[in-house]
Image (cartoon, rainbow, N blue to C red):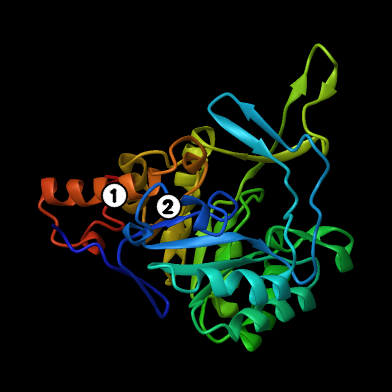
Amino acid sequence: MADLKVQIGGLQLRNPVLTASGTFGYGEEFADFYDLSLLGGIIVKGTTLHPRQGNPYPRMAETPSGMLNAVGLQNKGVHYFAEHIYPRIRTLDTHVIVNVSGSAVDDYVQTAAVIDALDDIPAIELNISCPNVKQGGMAFGVDPKAAAEVVAAVRQAYHKTLIVKLSPNVTHIAEIALAVEEAGADAVSLINTLLGMAIDAERRRPVLSTVTGGLSGPAVKPVALRMVWQVAQAVHIPVIGLGGIMTATDAIEFLLAGATAVEVGTANFIRPEAGAEIAWGIGQYLDRHGFAAVTDLVGTLQTS
C-alpha cells in the first residue's frame, strides 16, 4: 500500500485522517467501534479556560444535507481536562490534539499554556471563531489583525504544533490565513461551520434556542473545497481540510485541492467508523492510481 504518512508542523501523522472537534468526544466513546490506531489523530472537543455550560436546548437540528449545532462549547474547563480526562486518553494509540477556544486573548494563552505542559498532547487546534468579549463581541477569526494578535500571543506560550482553525464567515479567507501564518501558526484547518438557521413553520419559531447555529455536513462541502483551494495557494504552511467529508472520495477531493490532511466531522454521527473507512479508501485510491505516497497527490488538481 502507498505511504499515507503526512507532516503537520512537528507532528507526523500515520495517515491524513483526523476526527473533527466536537464530533468524536474524547475518543474513548468510539474505541468500542474500531481500533483508533487506524486514524491519523483525534481532535477532542473544544476546551476553554473556565467551565462552560453551553447553550440551552434545543441546540441541534437536522437540515437538508446537513445539521445545525449551537452546543456552545460545553466543557468542564482546561484544568479539569488536565487532571481527569488527559490521564485516561494519553495512552490512546493515535495522536490526541486539543481544540482550544476562548473569549479573550488571555483566555487562549492560559489554556494553551496548561495544554503545553501535557507531554502526550503534541498539538493544539486554536479555534479563533468565538466571540471576543473585550472587543465588543467581534470574532477573532473574521479580522486579520485580531486573528494575528491571538495567534502571536499563543505562540509565545505554546511550544508544540499550533494549528489555527479558520472561520468561513468571511469575505477573503486567504487574507486571514496569511495573517495567522505570519503570526506563527504551523498549519491552518478550515472550514469551521457556516452560520445558518432553521425555522419551525408550524410554531413560527426558530428551531434552535439561539436562533442561529453552525451548519455542517455535505451541504457545506463545495464552499469548504473552494476555501481550501484558495488558502492552499496563498500560504506556505500545511492546510487541513474539513467540511462535509463523508467518504474517501470527498477526502481525496480536498487533498487534490491542496489539503495535506483532512478532518471528518458530521459523518461520525452517522457512521462511527467513518474515519477508518476514509483512511482505508484513500490508500486504495492511491494504489489504484499508482501513487507511491499520499503527499504525491496533495495539490495536484488540474485547473487548465
Q: Residue at x 47, y 38 (%)?
A: 222
Q: Amino acid at mark 2?
A: Trp
The x and y percentages for residue 200 are 78, 19
Q: Is residue 8 above or below residue 293?
A: below
Give x and y (percent) for residue 261: 38, 59
Q: Quadrant of the N terminus?
A: bottom left
Q: Are marks 2 and 1 in contact (CB under 8 Å)?
A: yes
| Residue 220 in picture, x, y percent from top left | 53, 38
Residue positioned 66% across, 48% down in the render: 169
Q: Is residue 252 visible?
A: no
Residue of label 1: 301
User: Which residue position is annotated with label 2?
Assistant: 229
Quarter of the rendering occupied by the C terminus? top left
Q: Where is residue 206, by image quadrant?
A: top right
Left or right placement of residue 205 versus residue 144 in this view: right
Under mark 1, the amino acid is: Leu
Can residue 98 be seen here? The reply is yes
Mark 2 or mark 1: whose residue is earlier in sequence = 2
Describe the element under mark 2 as helix, strand or loop: helix
Q: Is residue 192 left or right of residue 209?
A: left
Q: Residues within 10 Å of mark 1 (few under 14, many from 20)?
A: some
Q: Residues within 10 Å of mark 2 (few under 14, many from 20)?
A: many
Does residue 56 appear left or right of residue 166 in this picture? Answer: right
Label 1 sits on a secondary structure element that is loop
Query: Residue 133 sits in which quadrant?
Result: bottom right
